[in-house]
Image (cartoon, rainbow, N blue to C red):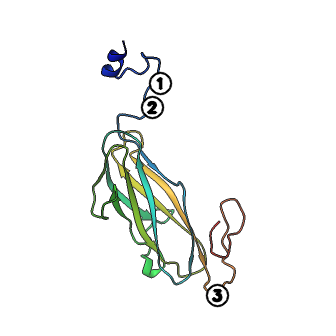
């Protein structure tokens, strides 16, 4: 009987538990929403966010974009906004789309932001993929721009508190 269970991979029939990993592709992020913490006004800071394929099939990312919360165009980091993100899969170099993340693999969204004024900064990250249940993953990206002189940032954390001196909540 044990040989049958091993060959048939019928864990439930052998008294074990069934495999909970989906056979298809399934997108997830390591942090959602994504709080970048703080950056000094006038600096440009690099950020990354991990994309996780929780399924066994390849996940294809066809587009990735940062916009204003209302969908408008963001200025680039040099102008006080966010550079459009790049995506690298399974530890590779950031490149052009589409990008394929292997089954149970990971990818990294990489971008820069460069606040020009103090306070909370918000963007919307949209990732289009071939995940059959979540073809468009949309999340909020937030950060706090801190004055370089150590003055008050004017930021408010998600829990209603105020960030520390480094701008992190």
Q: Is residue 111 left or right of residue 145?
A: left
Please determine whether, in this image, residue 135 is positioned above or below residue 162: above
Q: What element carries label 3?
A: loop
Q: Which of 144 and 80 is in front in this view?
A: 144
Question: In which quadrant will I find the C terminus?
Answer: bottom right
Q: Is mark 1 on a helix, strand or loop?
A: loop
Which residue is the site of mark 2? 20
- Residue 149: image tag: 3
Question: Residue at (67%, 70%) from the top-left corner?
Answer: 163
Q: What element carries label 2?
A: loop
Which residue is the site of mark 1? 17
Pointers 3 and 2 in contact (CB under 8 A)?
A: no
Q: In this view, does 56 lie to the left or right of 79?
A: left
Q: Position of residue 116 (x, y in %)?
A: 53, 82
Foreground label between 1 and 2 = 1
In terms of image quadrants, where is residue 103?
top left
Q: Position of residue 90 (x, y in %)?
A: 34, 55
Give the CA distance from mark 3 to mark 2.
51 Å
Question: Residue at (30%, 64%) from the top-left corner?
Answer: 93
Q: Mark 3 Cα within 10 Å, few/some/many (few <14, many 20+)? A: few
Q: Nearer the viewer, residue 33 or 108?
A: 108
Q: Where is residue 143 in the image (x, y as percent from the top left)?
A: 56, 69
Q: Position of residue 80 (x, y in %)?
A: 48, 79
Pointers 1 and 2 in contact (CB under 8 A)?
A: yes
Question: In which quadrant will I find the N terminus?
Answer: top left
């Amino acid at each position: 009987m044990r040989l049958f269970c091993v060959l048939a991979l019928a864990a439930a029939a052998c008294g074990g538990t069934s495999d909970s990993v989906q056979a298809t592709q399934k997108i997830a992020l390591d942090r959602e929403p994504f709080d970048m913490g703080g950056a000094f006004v006038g600096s440009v800071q690099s950020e990354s966010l991990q994309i996780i394929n929780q399924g066994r099939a390849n996940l294809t990312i066809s587009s990735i974009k940062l916009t204003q919360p209302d969908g408008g165009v963001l200025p680039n980091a040099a102008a006080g906004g966010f550079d459009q993100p790049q995506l690298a899969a399974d530890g590779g170099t950031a490149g052009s789309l589409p990008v394929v993340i292997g089954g149970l693999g990971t990818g990294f969204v990489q971008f820069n932001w460069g606040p020009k004024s103090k306070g909370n900064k918000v963007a919307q990250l949209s990732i289009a993929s071939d995940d059959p249940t979540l073809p468009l993953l949309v999340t909020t990206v937030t950060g706090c721009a801190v004055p370089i002189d150590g003055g008050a940032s004017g930021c408010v954390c998600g829990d209603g508190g105020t960030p520390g001196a480094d701008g992190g909540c």
